[in-house]
Amino acid sequence: AQSVTQLGSHVSVSEGALVLLRCNYSSSVPPYLFWYVQYPNQGLQLLLKYTSAATLVKGINGFEAEFKKSETSFHLTKPSAHMSDAAEYFCAVSESGGYQKVTFGTGTKLQVIP
Amino acid sequence: DVKVTQSSRYLVKRTGEKVFLECVQDMDHENMFWYRQDPGLGLRLIYFSYDVKMKEKGDIPEGYSVSREKKERFSLILESASTNQTSMYLCASSFPGAGVNNEQFFGPGTRLTVL
């Protein structure tokens, strides 16, 4: 069975500081991994995805994530936070085959302090 | 531009009422999903459908049913609404298959309050 753990339900950073949102996964087969972002009063939209092509994945809005198999991690980073990055971020895992069920983490709310 | 729409952004219903939440996608996706989102619990899968008239239970199907009569439309039904079903409901769709096609496209959500 697959699962995702996001460490920290709330993270605060200063504008211009490094953003680091942590995600660890559990999967019995090589996983597909995703980060989604949810802005207030909106649905989720895809930030980036890992599908085994490259371990460092670049996404939209300057975000990137690195797949580390030995650590079963897929942490999301951005070098310099912007006020517009304030949102909730969800890590998700999917296993190939079957009906591609996706399991989401519990989310991390990012606050950016001016 | 891909689009998933949900029939209502906000809905208020009474305990015991039958509630219909509608979702429509215009991307010709085979897969459609219903989630509920609660603070601290993330997204939990209620039901999903991989084809017309096909459905599979997710992690929390109790108290819910679904209908998919057309490929583009997936309905979530609360047979007898209860206060513990007050939540944000999110619909999503995706192509079948592994890898990049697993990306799910989400609607804006319906915030349901059951009084």
Image: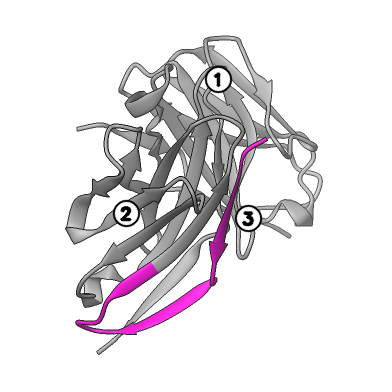
- Mark 1 → mark 3, Cα distance in angstroms: 25 Å
Q: Are marks 2 and 1 in contact (CB under 8 Å)?
A: no
Residue named by callout 2: A65
Q: Position of residue B36 (x, y in %)?
A: 61, 47
Q: Position of residue B4 (x, y in %)?
A: 36, 34
State which chain disc 3 sits on: B
State which chain disc 1 sits on: A
Q: Of residues B60 and A60, which is closer to you in this image? A: A60
- Do marks 2 and 3 share a chain? no
- Mark 2 → mark 3, Cα distance in angstroms: 30 Å
Disc 3 crowd, CA 10 A, few/some/many (<14, 14-19, 20+): some
Figure quadrant of the C terminus of chain A: bottom left
Figure quadrant of the N terminus of chain A: top right
Q: Are marks 2 and 3 in contact (CB under 8 Å)?
A: no
Q: Which mark is residue B87?
A: 3
- Mark 2 → mark 1, Cα distance in angstroms: 25 Å
Instruction: Please report the residue visible at 81 percent of the width from the left and 45 percent of the height from the top.
Output: B16
Residue A2 magenta-highlighted: yes
- State whether residue B7 appears in this view: yes
Residue named by callout 1: A99
Q: Position of residue B74 (x, y in %)?
A: 52, 24
Image height of A47 relative to A22, above or below: above
Instruction: Please report the residue visible at 57 percent of the width from the left and 27 percent of the height from the top.
Output: B75
Amino acid type, mark 3:
Ser
Amino acid type, mark 2:
Ala
Instruction: Give the magenta part as a residue range.
Output: A1-20
Q: Position of residue A23 (x, y in %)?
A: 49, 58
Q: Is residue A75 left or right of residue A83?
A: right
Instruction: Please report the residue visible at 40 percent of the width from the left and 44 percent of the height from the top.
Output: A34
Q: Along the polypeptide, which appears first: circle 2 or circle 1? A: 2
Q: Of residues A80 and B111, which is closer to you in this image? A: A80
Q: Circle 3 — which element? A: strand
